[in-house]
Image (cartoon, rainbow, N blue to C red):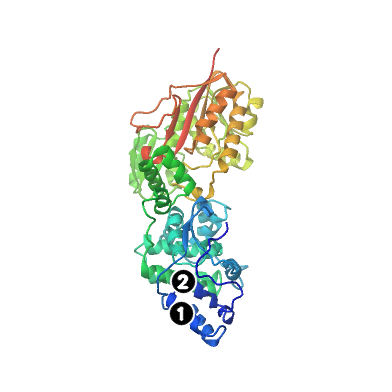
Amino acid sequence: MAPVPARGRHRHGQADGRGDHPLSWLRGVFIDHAARRVQRQSPRGSRAAGTGARRAAGSRRRAVGPQRGGAHLCRGRGGGHPESAAIVGDPPVSTRLNHPAPSTARRPPASSAREVAALVLSRVESGRAFANVLLHHQLTGAHLSPADAGLATELIYGTLRHQARLDWTISGALRYALDDLPPRIRAILRTATYQLFFLERVPARATVHEAVQLARRYGHAGTAALVNAVLRRLADQGERPLPDESDPAARIVVEHSHPRWLVDRWLQRFGTRDAIALCRTNNTPAPIFARVNRLRASPDAVIAELAASGVAATPTMLAEGLRLQGPFEVRHRLTESGALTVQDLGAMLITHLLDPQPGETIIDACAAPGGKTTHIAERIGDRGRVIACDIHPAKVEAMARRVAQLGLRCVEAVVVDGRRLGDTLGHTADRVLVDAPCTGLGVVRRRPEIKWRVHPHHLPGMAALQQAILDGVAGAVRTGGMVLYSVCTMEPEEGQEVVEAFLKRHPDFELDPTLPLPDGLPSVQVSRPGMVTLLPHRQGTDGFFIARMARRTT
């Protein structure tokens, strides 16, 4: 994206003292009008100009004076991040800052929570992996204390949740576009700004000091000086005022940190109050739910054992579902023994709506990692045939190990492309679950990076894949059988529109309006009988679209 021009810019090549010292360009980080007047009175390229540059780079004084130019809301990284203006005509900041620090080829493991956070976030932004995977890898090598590991986790997820608001604030203190900075320097600025304004227990001096050290380690003296200057100004002046409420979308984009395109469509679909509530809920940690394997333990026994380990568990609207509160470890002895599986309540509800019965043949077309497959097997008492399919062999192997851990015998884990299931298993299934690949916009509470990765142009391609999978499984359903389609997103292109297009192509299928919704479920959005949408701010679950279709008998 072309940078927005800023007034009062320098033209590239103009003698303004930039060449007198490696850090002289830092005079342009802030707009200090008093300093500018002194600069203009000095001979160009003179010693005075160079000396002023050295002071700007090395001095501990905060820059003063009003700001101008700067930040605008525009569509950029993340589909709507606020970004500031760069100096048009100057070389991109990245060409001046993107020089690696010496001897960076073989670094020791990260030594602090802040370093772990910066490394994870810079890689997340590049789209290489999800934060939870990278965090686990970094913590394994860093050997941090539990307290520091907790701080690293908070910094990563807090920064991702509030990234647009952080960028808005940082951009107000930068003369350059934030996106022009190297990824690690950008991550260091974001995590430090999050600490300044969201983690009051962390002293500002410590935050700034370590951020500067990290900027020097992963950049050079110039990047360290920039980080020091920006953070000192933010610590001194406070958070940047939010956009005016006269533009509700712009205000929500910054205040609740969601991309503009998503805010616009949610405002249109749900109205202002629900759109804000949904964005606000997305920025809170998701509750922890778990499913009791009633083939191995009763809910009451599990609740008692959890209480003995300091974890409070309360029943939910589903008999096997529990809500957990407390220091629950995923590798708890109950999960290791197969008595308990961590799973969102909305995901459990999908199996309830599938309503599998003992003795039936049931296909899970997109089964990995296996949470719904094993729930189906538990629901039918391990009596019947559950065929768990996935296209990735490694995922199928991992799923088979989990099935064995739970002691389930009715599950067959196979490598099959769901788009070809009808050719492989023609008319054999009583029920087919298609929990299709999707954008994941319903699980932003758990994976906040999703909202910055997904863009509108991703929706048509995802919908095409979803329709291909539905077409592929149609031939596997016997007459009178059922297909349950689910996606962990609320967007119509991946939900209702996919199902309606499928029904037009397959007139032998129809919506089944007899969805067995459990008592106690808060009012759900029903677009048509047989379709239901779960919204995080209303039902307290992950966001899902679910539709149940039956194959006609005549």
Q: In this view, does 364 lie above or below 135?
A: above
Is 195 left, or right, of 501 in this rendering? left
| Percent x, y of residue 110 | 52, 65
Res 469 seen here:
yes
Is 77 left, or right, of 267 in this rendering? right
Task: Examine the image and state in which quarter residue 198 appears.
Answer: bottom left
Name which residue type carries label 1.
Arg
Residue 37, disc: 1
| Percent x, y of residue 433 | 53, 29
Q: Quadrant of the N terminus?
A: bottom right
Q: Which is more toward the observer, 282 or 171?
A: 171
Look at the numbered discs 2 and 1 and tell me whether their residues touch, using CB distance below 8 Å.
no
Residue 226, disc: none
The local secondary structure at tag 1 comes to helix
Q: In which quarter of the image is the C terminus?
A: top right
The local secondary structure at tag 2 comes to loop
Mark 2: give few (<14), some (14-19) or many (20+) Cα within 10 Å.
Answer: many
| Percent x, y of residue 7 | 50, 67
| Percent x, y of residue 177 | 52, 63
Mark 1: give few (<14), some (14-19) or many (20+) Cα within 10 Å.
Answer: few
Disc 2 target residue: 30
Q: Is residue 183 above or below residue 470?
A: below
Name, please, the residue furthest toward the bottom: 47
Q: Which is more foreground, mark 2 or mark 1?
A: 1
Q: In this view, does 545 lie above or below 218?
A: above
Is 239 left, or right, of 144 in this rendering? left
Name which residue type carries label 2.
Phe
At a point 53% along the width and 27% down the height, the residue shown is: 500
